[in-house]
Amino acid sequence: MTPIQPISQVGAEEAMYIPACSIFRRFLKKQGLKFTPERAKILDAVLAKEEVFEAEQLLYEMRNENVRVSKATIYRTLKHLLEAKIIREVLIDSKQAHYQLTYGKDPQAYLVCMETNTIIPFDAPELKALRERICAEHNFKPVSHQFVIYGLCSDVKDEPDEEA
Amino acid sequence: MTPIQPISQVGAEEAMYIPACSIFRRFLKKQGLKFTPERAKILDAVLAKEEVFEAEQLLYEMRNENVRVSKATIYRTLKHLLEAKIIREVLIDSKQAHYQLTYGKDPQAYLVCMETNTIIPFDAPELKALRERICAEHNFKPVSHQFVIYGLCSDVKDEPDEEA
DNA sequence: ATCGATGCAAAAACTTTGCATCGGT
DNA sequence: ACCGATGCAAAGTTTTTGCATCGAT
């Protein structure tokens, strides 16, 4: 127990002491795919992400650090990372895909500020129980879930709005 | 109490016995906007929607019924309907915006089948309490929330998958 | 008559794909 | 050497916008 601090934070469930990199290599090999330098670079960039991120943002940041990978490869690799369960999708808005590291990031619950677009993850263990109950009622096999609360974060103070 | 069955089902909170059409007209007038035949047609189409819908789908269906409105007007009107709180956004996938009637549609909780893309709304009153608790903890002013469970619905039976 | 609304087509934003070349295994 | 991966640019989707014309108030 108490595995050494792995990729990022704490809180996983499975074999999170196996480095994400090994998991990805293993996944790729199993699929007959290759572990290329580009995929390694993208994995690194993803592992450095503490919060929710987007594909274009990742590309932009990598370019800023002179890590050059094509947009197409970013998108292609994110798909593989999803399949490998190293990242997961987070539905924050409908314009763009948002992702988050799976390892060390248990909460699938977020506060989203409609003003500043800040995304604050929070923990709500009771959601699991609720999910089980609902799924049993509907004969539904759950795979994942997400709870999002939209509103205004504490930085948004008394915005002057709504004058007739 | 017990207002006559309004636009669609039951379960609203506010003045849901005021027809959506009046609400929209009022909203438009307040904003110095006009209530045009196109907007009326779109509102009608939206009010006929029992379930979650998308912009293109709405356009397609209207065309099928020989109700001709341009794509641009659909998108523009959906925005106004959102502002007027007649519809709300539902985050189902990141490729496309999904909407749902606000009136008579309380649940902001869905089961989404990853195989058939079926969307099954369900009721979970306990989410409100959870939301209050979390928001209080984070000094966050809630506006709305959404709970989505992804998985496989009862129509998807023992799909053969995962062979090594 | 005014000023917003419409329709069309072009543009924009995000994502995917075709193709020639490159490079893991 | 094989077969998948990459980069680029083109194409695809969904949504937005510019502009001339139309129409509600």
Image: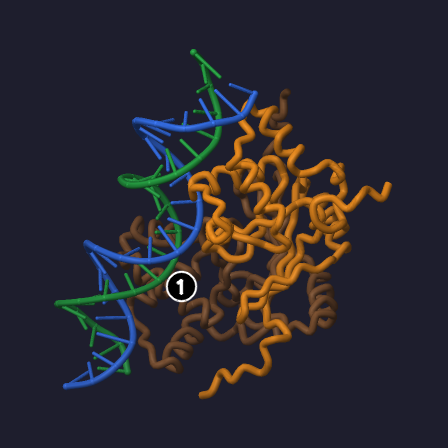
Chain colours: A orange, B brown, C blue, D green
Q: Quadrant of residue B83?
A: bottom left
The residue that mark 1 highlights is B78
- Quadrant of the image containing the C terminus of chain A: bottom left
Q: Residue at x 34, y 67 (%)?
A: B40
Relative vertical location of residue B153 with respect to residue B28 in this rendering, above or below: above
Where does residue C1 sit, x and y in percent of width and height? 14, 86
Left/right of residue B131 with respect to residue B78 in the rendered view = right
Q: Could you tell me the amino acid type at mark 1?
A: Leu
Left/right of residue B137 with respect to residue B61 in the rendered view = right
Where does residue D20 sit, x and y in percent of width and height? 13, 67
Where does residue B93 sit, x and y in percent of width and height? 51, 49
| Residue A24 or residue B136, whichever sits in front | A24
Left/right of residue C11 with respect to residue C24 in the rendered view = left
Q: Residue at x 67, y 56 (%)?
A: A109
Residue at the far right in the pictured view: A1
Relative vertical location of residue A81 with respect to residue B34 in this rendering, above or below: above
Where does residue B6 sit, x and y in percent of width and height? 51, 67
Q: Residues within 10 Å of mark 1 (few under 14, many from 20)?
A: many
| Residue C12 or residue A60, whichever sits in front | A60
